[in-house]
Image (tube, coloured by chain):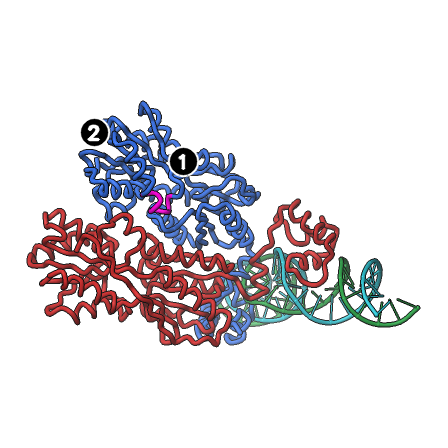
Chain colours: A red, B blue, C cyan, D green
Amino acid sequence: MKVKLEDVAKTAGVSPTTVSRVLNNRGYISEKTRQKVEDAIKELNYYPNDLARSLFKKRTNFIGLILPTINNPFFSELALNIENLFSDLGFKIILCNSSGHYEKESSYAEMLIRQQVDGIIVCSYNRGIEAYNHPQLPFVAIDHYLSPNIPVIGSDNYEGGRLAVQHLIERGCKSIIHMNGPADLETPTQLRRKAYEDLVENPITYELEDTFDDEATAATIKKILSEHPETDGIFASDDLIASVCLKVANELKIKVPEQLKVVGYDGTQLVQVLLPQLTTVRQPIEKIAKAAVLKLIDLINDPSTVKKEEITLPVKLLVNSTT
Amino acid sequence: MKVKLEDVAKTAGVSPTTVSRVLNNRGYISEKTRQKVEDAIKELNYYPNDLARSLFKKRTNFIGLILPTINNPFFSELALNIENLFSDLGFKIILCNSSGHYEKESSYAEMLIRQQVDGIIVCSYNRGIEAYNHPQLPFVAIDHYLSPNIPVIGSDNYEGGRLAVQHLIERGCKSIIHMNGPADLETPTQLRRKAYEDLVENPITYELEDTFDDEATAATIKKILSEHPETDGIFASDDLIASVCLKVANELKIKVPEQLKVVGYDGTQLVQVLLPQLTTVRQPIEKIAKAAVLKLIDLINDPSTVKKEEITLPVKLLVNSTT
DNA sequence: AATAATGTGTCAAGCGGATGACATATTATT
DNA sequence: AATAATATGTCATCCGCTTGACACATTATT
């Protein structure tokens, strides 16, 4: 049997109400009684049942975090920051890896609602997920337009794309291609591509089917590079794709940066360590996390907070030796 | 106001009990009534309150996952696998990044207990955390000895160390050093070091203070390599450290693998992509995840499951161009 | 026609704790 | 000595849902 408040009361020789008063710091409590109660709590190894508490309080301090996969430097760095911030504020994170699949994302969202989370941060998005229309439940999206009523946080994707492509041009690239993940919907990240298309004369964007399958990605890139030997610049929409490009170039004996220049996107700490030579666009992940957390907290504490908002944070080009 | 079971009952024109019967598939229900109830659920956008359910059932289907940081390829790959497996089984993960700090780990553990999680997986460990002695609560540890009653899952650390060092020796290294993270306690991972010390004549192990501070790590390594120019082999206890070694070697114009050979540890998919040239010891992360999940599930479903157990999974040396 | 199976409702108690109302002491303040 | 502040207890209710007991229909089966 689990120890409950009532047991603590008995052991301390006080009433359940008094124990609750100690636990919640309410009303008048003498030092002596407080001590007795705390001793009993220690003696019995009592942990209050937060389910019961939450049920009554109608507040769980749970936050749902939905992302494609935690096993990706961008998301893991983002998730770490988000979790840390929430943890300091007394919130707990329920982690959901949607793999980008509709079914999964949908059932995660539903689960979170049933779990009575206080809010949800979404970094993944499949159109038509009913649960995202749940009334009164605060949502914040990162780099995705979930609905007109859900605020979006992200970095300046257009500027990021511009910086990357401009840089390639300045370094003398004549034939730049763009590698993108599956061009889902109209997400803010598509602005990277937009910038590319605005800057280059004959833009060619390749949409990689499944960016989590590195073998397949490598094969595709190999094919592209053989079919377009004139390519001398690649703007990859994330660092992992850029990394695969480098690997393939190496296999094909194409010299980087002499024959081919590559720019990535994200600039996570991890990639900075593992692949320091990569020129990339650094997203301000810490700031994105902070903005998302603060926004969600605002929405939770004050439902009248303006929802229709887009927060765009500045990016930075990190020039290294792949360009 | 949130929609509750009672509202569904009213809308469907049936009793609350009947709605509950539909929801839980209990007792006799005619097709017609079931339909009426389901229509009402849809119409009202009703989501059952799993808090209330859990409170009654004394089962939350929550699992706590405590690790140092999700922003590390080994842990993020592990966490992804663990979360996926649990999700398929109807469990939800509460993510806890302890940063390796006692205070944090301790308060996370306490929080998880208060939250009534059904079980906890720990990949981090500071000695003396009271909550880990919580009676009746199933724990599984990965690569750490939490208590004699908590099963440990991990890969064959001694064999991994042996493979790495043996390989360096076979490649002709005469002066091999070992780079370790902070040598916490007697964890199974210290067996990597043990193997190194058993195989090398004058073993020198460097304990890096904070492996998450790459600048500091780089500085330390630089110092070591300047002070010991005879070093021709490094066995790093994880891939990130190995990566920093490569970076430093590059800065110091030390040629890898000609003058210096480096072997890492973990062999995550991510590092395989970003740093394919690294020779490393691959841990069977998927298998570790699976073993941990299955063990925890067993403990949850049958408390009499044998706890005192150590599951050791095989490792593999991946030879690439840094050796 | 009698019995069994099926379908639905009512009612009450319980999960663990929070809270408000009220009663009654004890101690402090004027 | 009277009043106020402090300290603790009792009691009932609520949070949203589950479950068992029991009653009463309606169908199906023999």
Task: Please tell me which residue is depicted at 24% across the width and 48% down the height of the picture.
Answer: B274
Q: What element carries label 2?
A: loop
Distance from disc 2 to disc 1, alpha carbons, whole Å, reads 32 Å
In magenta, the rendered stretch is B211-218
Residue identifier under label 2: B171
Residue B271 coordinates in the image, percent (x, y):
27, 46
Query: Is residue C24 depicted above or below B190 in this figure?
Result: below
Camera-nearest residue between B94 and B220: B220
Question: For residue C19, which quarter of the picture?
Answer: bottom right
Mark 2 surroundings: few (<14), some (14-19) or many (≥20) residues within 10 A? few
The residue sitting at the top extreme is B201
Does the segment drawn in magenta span residue B257?
Answer: no
Residue B251 coordinates in the image, percent (x, y):
23, 43
Answer left or right for B287 relative to B150. Answer: left
Task: Give the quarter of the figure containing the C terminus of chain B.
Answer: top left
Question: For residue A23, which quarter of the picture?
Answer: bottom right
Residue A174 coordinates in the image, percent (x, y):
9, 63
Residue B255 coordinates in the image, percent (x, y):
19, 37
In the image, what residue type sits under mark 1? Answer: Ile
Task: Please tell me which residue is depicted at 39% across the width and 70% down the height of the picture.
Answer: A132
Query: Is residue B278 depicted above or below A261 in this figure?
Result: above
Residue B297 in sight here: no
Residue B155 in sight here: yes
In the image, what residue type sits under mark 2? Answer: Arg
Mark 1 surroundings: few (<14), some (14-19) or many (≥20) residues within 10 A? some
Task: Please tell me which residue is depicted at 20% across the width and 50% down the height of the picture.
Answer: A215
Q: Mark 1 lies on which chain?
A: B
- The image's mark for residue B311 is 1
